[in-house]
Image (cartoon, rainbow, N blue to C red):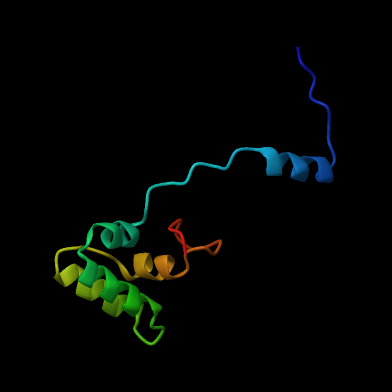
Amino acid sequence: MIEKQPIGLAGELDALTSAPAAPRGPRCSIGTLLQNADSDVAMSLRTVLDQTGVSAKAIADALSRHGDPVTSNTVARHRRRGESNGCRCER
């Protein structure tokens, strides 16, 4: 039997830097929509996502009315991409 040797915090953190990156999951539905939409729609969606004065609910409702069922939570999470509580899409 192989015995694991206890390592300190510094050793464990150093090991994380040499470990391969965790696989990224699938794009969120907003990221998928941006990838598949025509350029005009994608540009308009990117613009409105960056407008903090436009609510996530308003964006989700507009997308849902045009055939892409999306919740306001999904929009809000995509807006936080790159943060610990955001989606996995690249910023």
Q: Residue 11 occupies which quadrant of the picture? A: top right
- Looking at the image, is 72 positioned above or below residue 18? below
Q: In the image shown, does 55 or 31 lie closer to the viewer?
A: 31
Q: In the image shown, does 73 or 44 lie closer to the viewer?
A: 44
- Looking at the image, is 90 positioned above or below residue 51? above
Q: Quadrant of the N terminus?
A: top right
User: How far from the left and from the top, in percent, is residue 23?
Assistant: 49, 41
Task: Report the residue at 69% width, 39% height from top.
Answer: 18
Q: Residue 12 occupies which quadrant of the picture? A: top right
Q: Residue 71 occupies which quadrant of the picture? A: bottom left
- Looking at the image, is 50 positioned above or below residue 2? below
Q: In the image shown, does 27 or 91 lie closer to the viewer?
A: 91
Q: In the image shown, does 85 or 52 lie closer to the viewer?
A: 52
- Looking at the image, is 3 positioned above or below residue 72? above
User: How far from the left and from the top, in percent, is residue 17?
Assistant: 70, 44
Which residue extends farthest front?
39
* Badge count: 0
Q: Is residue 17 left or right of residue 56?
A: right
Task: Report the residue at 46% width, 56% height from top.
Answer: 88
User: How far from the left and from the top, in percent, is residue 65?
Assistant: 15, 71
Task: Report the residue at 28% width, 73% height from top.
Answer: 43
